[in-house]
Image (cartoon, rainbow, N blue to C red):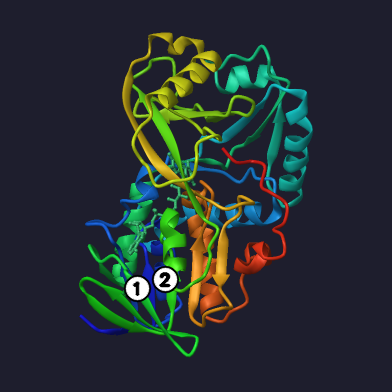
Amino acid sequence: MKKNYDAIIIGGGIAGLATAFNLAKMNFGDILILEKELFVGAGATAKCAGGIRAQFSSKVNIEISSKSIEVFENFESITGEPALYDQVGYTFLLTEESTVEPYIKAAELQQSLGLDIKILSADDIKELAPPVRTDDIIKATYHSRDGLGDPHEYLQGYFRASKKAGVEILTEAPVTGIAIESGKITKVTTPKGDFETALVINAAGPYAKLIGDMVDIRIPIEPYRRQIVTSGALDFIPPTMPMVVDVSSGLYCHKESKGLLMGWADKDVPAGFDESQDPDYNDNILMRALDRIPQLETAEVANSWAGLYETTPDHHAIIGFYKEVEGFFTIGGFSGHGFMHAPGAGIVAAEIICGKKPSIDITRLAPGRFADGSGEEEINVI
Ligand SMILES: Cc1cc2nc3c(=O)[nH]c(=O)nc-3n(C[C@H](O)[C@H](O)[C@H](O)COP(=O)(O)OP(=O)(O)OC[C@H]3O[C@@H](n4cnc5c(N)ncnc54)[C@H](O)[C@@H]3O)c2cc1C
């Protein structure tokens, strides 16, 4: 194994692998991914619900989604690796007057950026998602190019394509230190040895801030526990059922292995790396799900798990070089949307690193933005 690389990527999750693949495609040079776990994709990516959508409230998030959706739709022709993008769409149910105006405003922005967003009625939802209780729905938004993907399948696709393109990957190699000389990165330390480099790409997901600590940079990406419950097989969930987001209760659900996957974000949970499951959390998810889909009364729990969101104060990712240390780049802080945003973000990150003009203006995602007050928050966070 070489001891000197043009770029070292810390983290073999979907963000690290998408960046590696795109850098390799742009012939960046010798690239090494260092992953602390035994396998790539064992972090937040393994816990992901697989939702992919363009329905966001900020321009940059919509644009990254649109770019990513193009990649999800054409993954095999881009990477040479097959992966299924099940475009069942996403619908956001609006049951309180206070949510209608901001979601319709966001839908108008999405439409102005070229997306075919529909505003639906309760009757439309009855047809689109028959098990859903619709009596309180005022309006709903819907985008048919949104949908579901298997995070493992896409991650493995990027993994294999990156390896074929010459990227090296070392697992069980936690980065424990980053050396700096005269303000420039020189070396990365792991228990498996030191590796020289002038460029470190921090793609450590919920652990990104700990990588920042190694170079004395405060990265405001905090880990927050989120949980998911899946049901056993249910004969009333049609294969065309879209991802349903109940905006007021915070419940989201989609079809999964002949049953349903259900999630809910407890916004009161404190920041921390704890991934143990809280049974109250599961009860809370099920209570909300039962309220929206009464037929779930007979459902049995098949599986449940907890994972970490990687959240920034304004719910936008951080993508770019930090000015304080030469050669320190971060891609992360997707605030729970890193799977759906990684394909587009990986392209833009690689373009910036290669010195090209990024195909999306991501000034809004600049690492330094928090010093002088960050911009508007993304409201469409679940
Ligand atoms: C319950 C849940 C549901 C979700 N649902 C969705 C969804 O539907 N759609 C969506 O788009 N997103 C969803 N997300 C968010 C999504 O999973 C993440 O945004 C995304 O996986 C982040 O990818 P990443 O590569 O940045 O991080 P990760 O996948 O966590 O990868 C980072 C990697 O860095 C490694 N690492 C950390 N520290 C070090 C170190 N010191 N040295 C070496 N390696 C290190 C970790 O082991 C890990 O493999 C969900 C998340 C959770 C928890």
The one nearer the camera, 104 or 187, is 187
Q: Which mark is residue 238?
A: none
Estimate the spatial distance between the alpha carbons at disc 2 and disc 1, rounded to whole Å.
Answer: 6 Å
Q: What residue is shown with label 2?
A: 214
The answer to whether the residues at label 2 and label 1 have Cβ atoms under 8 Å apart is: yes
- Quick one: SS at disc 2? helix
Question: Is 69 displayed left or right of 282 in the figure?
Answer: right
Can I make out residue 5 in this image?
no
The C terminus - image quarter:
top right
Task: Give the vertical position of 233 relative to 314 (above or below).
Answer: above
Q: What residue is shown with label 1?
A: 177
* Residue at 33% over, 65% down: 161
Q: Amino acid at mark 1?
A: Gly
| Disc 1 Cβ-to-ligand 1 distance below 8 Å | no
The N terminus - image quarter:
bottom left
Spot occupied by residue 155 in the image (x, y as percentages of width and height): 36, 54
The one nearer the camera, 330 or 67, is 330
Q: Quadrant of residue 59?
A: bottom right
Which circle's residue, 2 or 1, is located before the other in the chain? 1
Spot occupied by residue 277 in the image (x, y as percentages of width and height): 35, 32
* Residue at 60% over, 31% down: 91
Task: Give the vertical position of 7 relative to 314 (above or below).
Answer: below
| Disc 2 Cβ-to-ligand 1 distance below 8 Å | no
Q: Residues within 10 Å of mark 1 (few under 14, many from 20)?
A: some
Can I make out residue 152 in this image?
yes
Q: Amino acid at mark 2?
A: Met
Spot occupied by residue 309 in the image (x, y as percentages of width and height): 47, 46
- Quick one: SS at disc 1? strand
Q: Quadrant of residue 286?
A: top left
Spot occupied by residue 187 in the image (x, y as percentages of width and height): 35, 82
The one nearer the camera, 326 or 292, is 326
Q: Residues within 10 Å of mark 2 (few under 14, many from 20)?
A: some
